[in-house]
Image (cartoon, grey):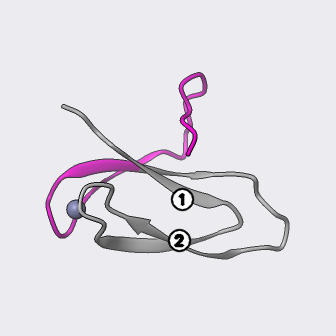
Amino acid sequence: MSYYNLMHDPKENRKTCIECGKTFTWSEDGPFYPGGKGTEYINCPYCGAGNGSIRTSGYVFTSKIEE
Ligand SMILES: [Zn+2]
């Protein structure tokens, strides 16, 4: 797991978990392999529930939002 503290990733998205209702962020991260697209699932970092999926050649990272 790595965090983008220096770069502001424009692809970062907010999502509210369908199961527990908490808000988290998810973003795509590399390395991006050309032609290596697969399905990555967006899982809630609080309860692990599936919140959809995307097609990407990288990985999906999710982070809790502390408020
Ligand atoms: Zn959840």
Q: Which residue is situated farthest in the bottom direction here? A: 39
> On screen, 1 above or below 19?
above
Q: Amino acid at mark 2?
A: Ile
Q: Quadrant of residue 20?
A: bottom left
How far separated are the C-alphas under marks 1 and 2? 8 Å
Residue ID for mark 2:
54
The location of residue 64, given as percent across then percent down, is 31, 44
54 or 31, nearer to the observer = 31
Residue closer to the observer: 15 or 2: 2
Left or right, 4 with respect to 49, comes to: right
Asked where in the image residue 36 lies, by quadrant, the reply is bottom right
- What is the magenta range? 1-25
Quadrant in which ligand 1 is drawn: bottom left
> Which residue does the numbered mark 1 point to in the structure image?
60
The residue under the point 28% across, 71% down is: 49
Q: Count neighbours of disc 2 (C-alpha within 10 A) and say few if under 14, some if 14 to 19, many if 20 or more.
A: some
